[in-house]
Image: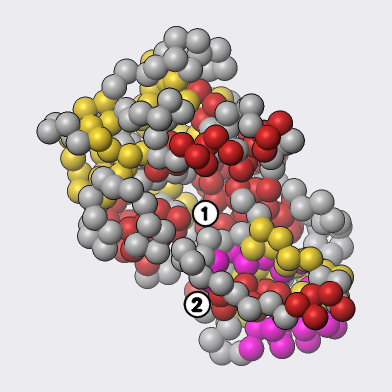
């Protein structure tokens, strides 16, 4: 089967023919239907997130189960599925305590399957990694059955793909915060795919003010469609001062959906006394932010990380699918560009330029 393979960082992905093993116990083969273009894969491409190579990237996707291995019980051939990039083991401490989004075993095995082996090889026998055990930039993938969440027939595949990452991470990261209540003020720094969904999450929670922050005017205008009530171009004005002015001292919740020292520090400073700063975006490996510890204590702020919606991905998927089918969130409107697999490098060029919305690879 064909896949987009990254052999070296800072180089384009190559469309290559790979040999794929049959699913082993507890695994399935999924024929890919749609795959989202996400910045997390771009971090690997640029070298900001060092990863073993060669690798098939892509972790936001949806497809149809076409083969099941021994012992598979949660899905069957023909099921249309949204894919989770944390196919949790169900047995480690994190899973047992309700944090399957940060499954210990998944983290330890990384880009290999749960038995520590590979399912992809080049024709010369070189083993190929699958990003997040998925690697959805491929015609088909062999993955743990836990990666698959069956979806109704009326959910389009490009919508399902986005629910697998950007919608779950953005909307979930807001609605799953334990202290989030109706009427709170919210700032979202970064209006990429995850940021737009964080805005939708704030709208779902009936936030009184939803402030979008970015450096591109066109992206800020686009943000109005997904719940922003106010916008700030942080290249033209100090976002911290502007947010404090709009909210009489700071927001109840500030979300950094971009992931950088600058944006995390801005989010923290824009958070009011007793408020919460949530870091959602992944910063380059090794980057740190400066947080004034005395002020953290005296103003009783909370600083938290949110990974994959802060909760079980499958539980979040269920909520999001209902919200989508009820018309309470707009997922289709996030898709502004569609590509074929061989156009994948063009798709990432568009992301790098900061174009609106989300790009999606559509498979035949």
Quarter containing the N terminus = top left
Provide residue 85's location: percent of width, then percent of height: 50, 40
The residue most toward the left is 124
Q: Which mark is residue 334?
A: 1
Q: Give the residue furthest to the top.
A: 70
Expressed as whole percent of the image width and height from the top left, the position of residue 69 reads: 42, 13
Image height of 331 relative to 253, above or below: above
Can residue 47 be seen in this snapshot? yes
| Mark 2 crowdedness (10 Å alpha carbons): few <14, some 14-19, many ≥20 | some
Residue designated by label 2: 216
Q: Is residue 118 above or below residue 265?
A: above
Q: At 66% from the left edge and 54% from the top edge, which residue is drawn?
A: 306
How many other residues sit within 10 Å of disc 1, few (<14), some (14-19) or many (≥20)? many
- How many numbered marks appear? 2
Residue numbers of the magenta segment: 238-260
Q: Residue at x 52, y 54 (%)?
A: 334
How are the colours assigned in the image?
secondary structure
Placement of the C terminus among the 4 image quadrants: top left
């Amino acid at each position: 089967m064909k896949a987009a393979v990254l052999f070296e960082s800072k180089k384009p992905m190559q469309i290559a023919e790979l040999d794929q093993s049959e699913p082993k116990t507890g695994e399935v083969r999924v024929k890919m239907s749609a795959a989202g273009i996400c910045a997390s894969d771009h971090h690997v491409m640029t070298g900001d997130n060092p990863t073993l190579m060669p690798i098939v990237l892509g972790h936001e996707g949806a497809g149809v189960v076409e083969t099941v291995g021994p012992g598979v019980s949660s899905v069957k051939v023909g099921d249309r599925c949204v894919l989770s990039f944390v196919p949790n083991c169900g047995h480690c401490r994190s899973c047992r305590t309700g944090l399957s989004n940060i499954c210990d075993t998944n983290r330890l095995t990384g880009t290999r399957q749960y038995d520590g082996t590979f399912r992809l090889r080049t024709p010369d026998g070189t083993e190929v990694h699958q990003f997040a055990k998925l690697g959805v930039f491929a015609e088909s993938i062999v993955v743990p059955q836990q990666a698959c969440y069956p979806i109704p027939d009326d959910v389009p595949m490009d919508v399902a793909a986005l629910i697998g990452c950007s919608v779950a991470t953005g909307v979930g990261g807001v609605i799953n915060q334990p202290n989030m209540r109706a009427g709170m003020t919210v700032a979202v720094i970064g209006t990429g795919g995850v940021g737009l969904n964080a805005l939708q999450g704030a709208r779902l929670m009936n936030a009184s003010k939803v402030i979008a922050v970015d450096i591109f005017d066109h992206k800020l205008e686009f943000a109005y469609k997904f719940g922003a009530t106010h916008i700030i171009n942080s290249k033209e004005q100090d976002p911290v001062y502007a947010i404090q002015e709009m909210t009489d001292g700071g927001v109840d919740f500030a979300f950094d959906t971009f992931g950088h020292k600058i944006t995390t520090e801005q989010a923290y400073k824009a958070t009011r006394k007793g408020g919460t700063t949530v870091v959602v975006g992944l910063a380059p490996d090794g980057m740190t932010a400066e947080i004034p510890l005395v002020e953290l204590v005296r103003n009783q702020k909370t600083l938290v990380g949110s990974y994959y919606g802060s909760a079980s991905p499958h539980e979040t998927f269920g909520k999001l699918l209902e919200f989508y089918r009820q018309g309470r969130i707009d997922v289709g409107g996030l898709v502004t560009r569609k590509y074929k697999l061989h156009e994948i490098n063009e798709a990432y060029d568009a992301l790098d330029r900061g174009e609106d919305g989300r790009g999606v690879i559509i498979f035949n």
